[in-house]
Structures are given as structure tokens and as C-alpha cells.
Image: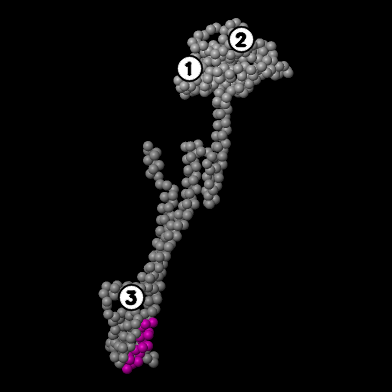
């Protein structure tokens, strides 16, 4: 439980990288914005100061004659004409004795005007004094205080430009950060998905797609190579397990199912069969005089006879029927479904007839063998797998007593009878 909690409390790589990238981008954008703002303000101050000096000089040239002749009216008109059209808050003209000849002040128009004046006082060189000279002698002075209207307009437009540039920079940083994150975390996410599927679902056939980043692509290729080896090993183990399972449930000589497989198949078939409507038949087969063949021609000949019997019996059955070797020269057949008892007897006759063809033994020897077959039908001759097999076995021994190489149908009431000597 604690491991699950710790796993949930851990942050994802994408979240960590995104937070780091956004932090770096935010700091960089803020620093760049502040730097641009400060540089813009400094440039604006230099420009405004220079412009104010130019205005003062323009007033100087214009009122020079009025100051020389001490004409207050002309000085006032000239001053008002220039100051009213420029960014001037207040202007004064003095003569050489320091007397005020002309004065002009821009009327205030509320809060905005006060803001402009505060901005001008904070940024501009206030006030500016320019001497009025005539023929190399100072005849007066011009004192000018700047107004902040132009400064505020330029500052607001500059701030708007900075905000737009900052927004574009932030968007670009976010876009590039996402692309970088996708380039890093995308392949890692795919790798994690494939690794999880391989661990939880044993899906070794999945592969990690290629990545744009060389290191990620190399990691994915190495992981795919590991999956190739695991898939190959899984296929090998599956093949080995199938071979072992087949070997455990089949006879190595005839490649037929063995007794254990037949018993399990018979039990499953009886569980799924309705005794009121369906029938199942079990045929028990035994080779006649098989011991004499082994004693006369050797075990290799006996094996050849068993293989031939298995092949011929299998050829007479339907696709869903099962034939198994019980051991030695004994075989069993499961016929399901069975519609009529006569169908089982007809198949038994076909198997007996197939034994009439000689069997080729090693050493170019041919012999003819025969089979005795006992038939038991479910549910008439037995309601369980064991009773059905015992009934078919007893019917096979009865077929041997009557005539070797024949068939016999089990009795309704099964009662074991000992086999006659020499059977």
C-alpha cells in the first residue's frame, strides 16, 4: 500500500520537464521584457530631453529680438505660439537683469494632466535653462519645463509593444517547450506502454516506434531487440511445452492418444451428452495372436503391425472420432455423436475388413493380422466412463471367444467373464 502511495505521489517526467521549461522560459521572458522596458525608458528619456532642448533653442531664436528691445508683448506672443504647439508645461523668459518678460503655462485638465506632469518630472531633465545671446552677449534666458503628454503616449505604446512581444515570446516558448516535451516524453511513453504490455500481458510481439531524437531512437531499438529475443524464447518455450504436452498425452510409436487422454476425452463427452436423446459408443480393439508375431518375427515386426493397425483404424473413422492406444496391442475408439447402434457396428466391420490387407514387415515379409472388437453404447451399457470401458472390454473378449477377427455388442447387464486360455 505504501509503495502505491509513493508511486502516486511521484511526479511524472512530463510534469517535471514542463514545469522546468516553463520556469526557465518565464524567467527569460520576464528578464527580456524588463530589459527591453528599461532600455526603452532610457531611450525615451534621452529623446525627450533632446527634444526639450530643441524646443528651448527654438524659443530662444524666436524671442531674441523681443528680449533685446525689452518688448514684453512680443515676447509673450512668440513664447505662446511655440509652447502651445510643443510638449511644454511651463516656459519663462527673463531679461539680463533677471526680470520676467514673458510667461506661459499649459492649463491642467484633470487627473491625466497630473499624471503626465509626474511622469515628466520623473523622467525629464527639469527645468532646462538656455541663455539668450545677441552679438556674443547674454541678453536674457529661457527656462522651459517639459510636459509628459508625448512621453506618456510613447511610453504606453512602448509598453503595449513590449506586452505583445512578451506574449509572442511566451507563446513561442510554450510551443517549443511542448515540442521538446513531445520529443522526449512521447517516445518514453510509448516505451513504457510496450514494456507494460510485455510485463502484464506477455505481448512480446509489440514494438516501440522510431523516435526523432537519436538517443531515444537508440533506446527504442535496443528495447525492440530485447523483445525480439524474448519473443523468440517465448516461441521456443511454447513449442517445447506443446511437444511435452503431446508426448505426455500420445503414444510415441503410433502417435495416437494414450489411455489418459482417451479417458479424459470420454469423461468430457459423457458430461456434455444428454442420455435421453444422444448416444456415444466405445469400441475396444485387440490384435489377435500379436504375441505369436512378436515371438516369431521379433519386436520390430510387432511395432510395424501396431503402426499399420493404427493407420488403418484412423482411416475408417470420422474427423471428430478418437482412437487411442491403451498399451500393448489394445486400442480404444470413441464414436461421438452416435445416432444409431448400427453405425458403430458398420464402422467396426470396416475396420475388420481393412485388416485383410497384408502388413509389410522388415525383411520383406508380409503377414495378415486381425482385430477382435467389442462395442459398448452409452447409456445402455454403462453410465460412467469406467463402466462403459469395462463393458466394451468384456464385449471384446466375447468376440474372441466366438470368432477371432469379429465384433460383438455388449450386453445390457454387464458381468465380467474370465478370458479363455490361448486368447
Q: CA distance from mark 2 to mark 3?
A: 133 Å
Q: Nearer the viewer, residue 91 or 192?
A: 192
Question: Residue pushed farthest right?
Answer: 364
Q: Position of residue 222 (x, y in %)?
A: 55, 43
Quadrant, the C terminus: top right
Labels 2 and 3 touching (C-beta < 8 A): no
Q: Residue under label 3, please give it.
A: 148
The residue under label 2 is 403
Q: Write down the region rendered in magenta.
A: 54-70
- Answer above or below: position of 22 versus 44: above
Which numbered disc flags the more N-terminal residue, 2 or 1? Answer: 1
From the viewer's perspective, tell me whether residue 251 is left or right of residue 135: right
Q: How is the image coloured?
A: one colour
Residue 102 in the image, given as x and y percentages of width and height: 29, 87
Q: Earlier in the sequence, mark 2 or mark 3?
A: 3
Mark 2 secondary-structure assignment: loop
Q: Is residue 254 magenta?
A: no
- Horizontal and vertical percent position of residue 329: 61, 15
Seen at 48% across and 17% down, the residue is 379
Above or below, 404 against 153 in this view is above
- In the image, 98 versus 388, the foreground residue is 388
Whether residue 326 is visible to the viewer of this picture, yes or no, is no
Residue 66 among magenta residues: yes
Image coordinates of residue 70 in percent, x first then y, are: 30, 92
Other-residue count near label 2 (Cα within 10 Å), few / some / many at <14 / 14–19 / ≥20: few
Q: Kindly report the distance in space between the C-alpha atoms of the residues bearing marks 2 and 1.
A: 27 Å
For disc 1, the marked residue is: 379
Near-viewer residue (310 or 22): 310
Amino acid at each position: 500500500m505504501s509503495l502505491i502511495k509513493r508511486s502516486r505521489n511521484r511526479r511524472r517526467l512530463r510534469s517535471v520537464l514542463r514545469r522546468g521549461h516553463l520556469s526557465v522560459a518565464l524567467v527569460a521572458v520576464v528578464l527580456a521584457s524588463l530589459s527591453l522596458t528599461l532600455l526603452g525608458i532610457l531611450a525615451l528619456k534621452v529623446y525627450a530631453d533632446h527634444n526639450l532642448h530643441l524646443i528651448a533653442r527654438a524659443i530662444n531664436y524666436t524671442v531674441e529680438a523681443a528680449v533685446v528691445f525689452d518688448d514684453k508683448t512680443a515676447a509673450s506672443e512668440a513664447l505662446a505660439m511655440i509652447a502651445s504647439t510643443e510638449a511644454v508645461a511651463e516656459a519663462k523668459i527673463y531679461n539680463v537683469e533677471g526680470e520676467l518678460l514673458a510667461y506661459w503655462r499649459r492649463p491642467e485638465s484633470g487627473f491625466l494632466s497630473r499624471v503626465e506632469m509626474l511622469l515628466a518630472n520623473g523622467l525629464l531633465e527639469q527645468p532646462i535653462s538656455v541663455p539668450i545671446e545677441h552679438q556674443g552677449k547674454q541678453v536674457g534666458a529661457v527656462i522651459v519645463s517639459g510636459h509628459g503628454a508625448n512621453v506618456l503616449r510613447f511610453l504606453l505604446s512602448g509598453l503595449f509593444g513590449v506586452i505583445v512581444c512578451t506574449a509572442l515570446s511566451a507563446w513561442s516558448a510554450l510551443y517549443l517547450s511542448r515540442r521538446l516535451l513531445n520529443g522526449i516524453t512521447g517516445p518514453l511513453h510509448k516505451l513504457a506502454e510496450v514494456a507494460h504490455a510485455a510485463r502484464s500481458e506477455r505481448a512480446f510481439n509489440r514494438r516501440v516506434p522510431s523516435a526523432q531524437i537519436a538517443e531515444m531512437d537508440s533506446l527504442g531499438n535496443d528495447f525492440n531487440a530485447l523483445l525480439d529475443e524474448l519473443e523468440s524464447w517465448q516461441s521456443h518455450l511454447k513449442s517445447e511445452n506443446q511437444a511435452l504436452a503431446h508426448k505426455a498425452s500420445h503414444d510415441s510409436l503410433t502417435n495416437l492418444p494414450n489411455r489418459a487422454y482417451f479417458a479424459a476425452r470420454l469423461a468430457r463427452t459423457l458430461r456434455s451428452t444428454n442420455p435421453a436423446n444422444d448416444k456415444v459408443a466405445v469400441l475396444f480393439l485387440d490384435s489377435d495372436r500379436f504375441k505369436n508375431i512378436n515371438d516369431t518375427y521379433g519386436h520390430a515386426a510387432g511395432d510395424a503391425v501396431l503402426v499399420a493397425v493404427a493407420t488403418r483404424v484412423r482411416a475408417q473413422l470420422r474427423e471428430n472420432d478418437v482412437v487411442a492406444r491403451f498399451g500393448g496391442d489394445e486400442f480404444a475408439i470413441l464414436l461421438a455423436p452416435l445416432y444409431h447402434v448400427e453405425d458403430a457396428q458398420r464402422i467396426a466391420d470396416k475396420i475388420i475388413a481393412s485388416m485383410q490387407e497384408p502388413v509389410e514387415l522388415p525383411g520383406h515379409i508380409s503377414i495378415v493380422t486381425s482385430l477382435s472388437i467389442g462395442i459398448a453404447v452409452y447409456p445402455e451399457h454403462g453410465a460412467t466412463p469406467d463402466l462403459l470401458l469395462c463393458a466394451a472390454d468384456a464385449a471384446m473378449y466375447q468376440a474372441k471367444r466366438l470368432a477371432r477377427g469379429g465384433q460383438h455388442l455388449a450386453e445390457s447387464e454387464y458381468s465380467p467373464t474370465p478370458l479363455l486360455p490361448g486368447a
